[in-house]
Amino acid sequence: MPTTRKNVSTGASTGSSVSNTSNTSNTSNTSNTSNTSNTSAASTPRTATDVSPTALRYLHNLLDLLDRGAPPEQFTAPAGAAQGGDLSDADAAAVAEATRVALRIRRTLSQHRRREAELAALFDTAGDLARLRDPDAVLKAIVHRAKLLLGTDVTYLSLNDDEAGDTYMRVTDGSVSAAFQQVRLGMGEGLGGLVAETARPYSTGDYRDDQRFRHTTTIDSAVTEEGLRAILGVPLRLGTRVIGVLYAADRTARTFTPDEVALLSSLADHAAIAIDGARLLDETRTALVDLNAASRTIEAHSDAMRRAEDAHDRLTDLVLRGGDITDVATAIGAVLQGGTLIHDAEGAELARAGTDSRPPSARAVAASRAGGRAVSVHGTWVCAVLAGHELLGSIALTGRADLDDADRRLFERASVVTALLLLLRRSVAETEDRVRGELLGDLLTGAADPAGLPARARRLGVNLDDPHAVFVLHAGTDTAPRPRLLAAAARIAQARRGLAGVHHDDVVLVFPAEAPGPGAASLASELGQILAGPVTVGAAGPVAGPAEFADAHAEARRCGTALCALGREGTGAALRDLGFLGVLLGDQTDLGGYVRQTLGPVLAYDAKRGTDLTHTLRVYFDVGASQARAAEALHVHVNTVVQRLDRIGRLLGRDWQRPERALELQLALRIDQVSRHDDAGRPAT
């Protein structure tokens, strides 16, 4: 063997090293130095220059196999050939040693490549999971990637149910059994339950025969139906909390290597983070949706509140600026885009805007009053107008059957403003009624200075210089209490620039009128409709000054009493409309007026045409209403009498021969006869 060898690690010549050592040593140490050099040479690894060309060729083959990544069995061929070839023992040993080193290097390289592939797969998995947003998609991706990385028959994932205290199958990949896909494991039951309980990985080469686990009929039957033998389970952990278990399983018995356990555990760690991230993202999405919904709700509520405040301010300002109830009804209809009806507590209409609907029923108003909220009745919203527990009236909104909560509250707020207006109106009305009542009392009693009454009246919008009629009102006990009658009279007085009040227990109404009789009849009809019952009205006047009101009031009272005595409740009249009773009851008897009122058409006909129908009528009554005897007394044919009576009937009306009317006519004829006698100074013929 050559004495000069190249060191594999240093690349320096051993022979040179030995030579340099001999030159620097003492002569006496030469033999020791040579022995040391030989020992070093014997222990130094053989290099390419130490082997034969044939052995060197075997070594090149080994390097080529490493470069190609050949399987392990191909590495044993060079060593076997070297032992049976023409190599020396030393060369054969060198080739065998090189083969063992090459196999070790191959294993190391294979492990590195496998680890590199696993790391790359884990990175890819992490990237894939990071891109997923749906929790279900994340779980499916985890299970599928585990199946690809470990190459097992089945992979699956279970999640812990904290409320039920167990773990349930969530996702599977490669499973064919429905029972297996729906199985639930109690904590500590089976391999998965033990992993979930202890937060540690467990594996088994053959689950059916492994007695380390607590077997149950449900789990064993599901595993048997799926045909699983080898099972590996690792925990899905978030910090110290286990949220589930990730499994890899084969249908043949085998042992899982530590590398497989580590790989599945790494994947489980990524999976747990991805699951938690997806959960947090889902919760964030849900929170954002809820937040957006809450934001929209708050915005809508804010808009509704702002709209309600604007409407309230608008209505309140309208009231404070002196707007009337019609202005408020119009404003409410404009704000709520509907028609509006406002009634008082008695059901009398106060205002109407944009609707021709009928007033709400008393039942609807009562329902709103009882609940304190607006109610819908047949597409019409009704809200009671309240001042505390007192009912002031009602508001009805038409044309808005779909009134939402915000508009409903706005409508209810409008009722509060309406209550404010009605209270103001009532306060003003009470004050004004008191002032008007005081003025009316002074007019009817004559106790105040007449000179100051016109000025007081003008301040109330009443002109006493105009002819006024005095009306005394009486409603039956079944019709309405006096406050309702007084309220109705006050509204009429205000509308007609008059006065209303209570005097000597009578509701008295005074307003400008030239003819009190027709005015009383019209007033009785109007009040009867408002109060839904008969109202009797006695009238007097017209009066020309403050001094005449007291007498007119007394006459109107007598007239009202006479109407009730005659059974004419619910009608209105003046004394002159009562015929001779009016003449008898009147303080100032106007006989000429009574004659003109009773016989006026006949007297006018005679005066215009020169006839004497008046005389014929008087004779007809004198002879007992006999046409034949009247013809004899007048010395005319009976047909002439018939024609004259027919003409009288057309002038006086068809009922002129009724007993009551006939009595009136006979009295008027007697008064006319006496009047003519007094005027002529001789008896009338």
Image (spheres, rainbow, N blue to C red):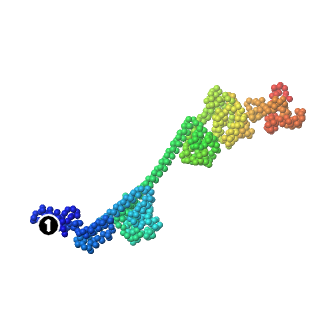
Q: Callout 1 environment at 10 Å: few (<14), some (14 to 19), or many (20+)?
A: some
* Above-or-below relation of 61 to 551: below
Of 525 and 63, nearer the camera is: 63
Residue 473, quarter of the rendered image = top right
Residue 286 at x, y = what percent? Answer: 46, 53
Residue 633 at x, y = what percent? Answer: 89, 33
What is the residue that sits farthest to the top in this orientation?
A: 681
Can residue 9 be seen here? The reply is: yes
Is 127 on the left or on the right of 7, as rendered?
right
Residue 79 at x, y = what percent? Answer: 28, 71
Of 585 and 648, nearer the camera is: 648
Of 680 and 403, nearer the camera is: 403
Q: Residue at x 38, y 59 (%)?
A: 124
What is the residue that sits farthest to the left in this orientation?
A: 28
Looking at the rendering, in which quadrant would you find the C terminus?
top right
Is 11 on the left or on the right of 477, as rendered?
left
Tell me the SS state at disc 1: helix
What is the residue that sits farthest to the bottom in this orientation?
A: 84
Can residue 197 be seen here? The reply is: no
Q: Residue at x 83, y 32 (%)?
A: 614
Residue 465 at x, y = what percent? Answer: 67, 28
Q: What type is the residue that disc 1 sits on?
A: Ser
Check disc 1 and report the residue beneath it: 34
Residue 274, quarter of the rendered image = bottom left
Q: Residue at x 83, y 30 (%)?
A: 609
Residue 674, quarter of the rendered image = top right
Q: Residue at x 33, y 63 (%)?
A: 113
* Total residue callouts: 1
Looking at the rendering, in which quadrant would you find the N terminus?
bottom left
Is 52 on the left or on the right of 223, as rendered?
left
* Above-or-below relation of 455 to 203: above
Is 637 on the left or on the right of 181, as rendered?
right
